[in-house]
Image (cartoon, helix red, strand yellow):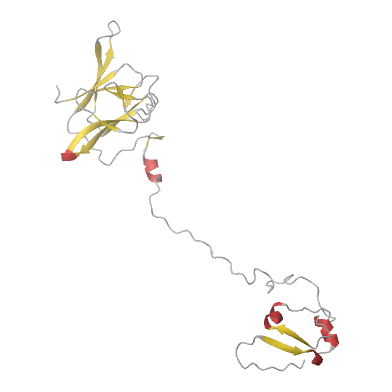
Amino acid sequence: MGTRSRSRSRERPEVRIKSERVSPSLNRLVGLPTDQNSVRLKREDIHTKPIYLDSTGRPIRRELGAGLSHSVDSPSANTTAPPLEVEKPNFEPSGLLAAETNQRNGVALKYTVPPESRLPVISWRLYVLKPDEADRTKMNVLKTIHLDAQEYYLFGCDRRVADVEIFHPTISKQHAVIQHRLVDNNLIVPYVIDLESTNGTFLNSERIKPSCYYELRERDIIKFGMSTREYVVLNDRSI
């Protein structure tokens, strides 16, 4: 075709093709109207809407991109895929290791040892008292529980985890804990904490709040659940 145009600049807005220099048969072939004096084709039309011819010179009627690996008219061709979000490493503690180590004999413990946990300097003990069957006003000493060999003692009916087993239908598997804690002036003091038991823990006849530490003092009396047994708090300096 007799198109002559030289670009004076690097970017040219459009290409002009005069129809009188193009034969009508070629106009019909490429789909241009034959009765127009001139037809303007934008530069992007030339590149984005090509016409494919078969062996006889006829245009191929098919959707652009059919059978082609890359189609200029395909939306995905001119669309940049969004970048994949790569998960950044997280170095915060997940708590899984603590959950695995906070077990005893394969049973998960409800209690977590606090950082101020210490072995006691004073030998603390519990005197277990039970009402006399003949005279309910009298209390008999059943046994003595020493609390100086460990930092804490777990009370409950599950023998797999309990340091002190209590056999009573109102006692939870993990009922309560007596914990030795370091306080001010390097003083180590025993505390009792209820592990959200069903029937509660009582200190001097008052039910304590679950998951709260209560300081134990000499001659305090602890009761667990609905059991009639009393646990009197004493130490080696009390006697």
Name the quarter where the C terminus is drawn.
top left
Quick check: 219 left or right of 109? left
Residue 76 image position (x, y, % from top left)? 64, 68
Quick check: 13 left or right of 230? right
Residue 25 image position (x, y, % from top left)? 85, 86
Question: In this picture, is 14 found above or below 152?
Answer: below
Quick check: 189 left or right of 228? left
Residue 170 image position (x, y, % from top left)? 39, 21
Question: In this picture, is 38 found above or below 235?
Answer: below
Name the quarter where the N terminus is drawn.
bottom right
The foreground one among 193 and 57 is: 193
Question: In this picture, is 93 found above or below 5?
Answer: above
Residue at image coords 68%, 86%: 14
| Rendered image quadrant of residue 173 | top left
Residue at image coords 37%, 43%: 98
Residue 176 image position (x, y, % from top left)? 33, 28
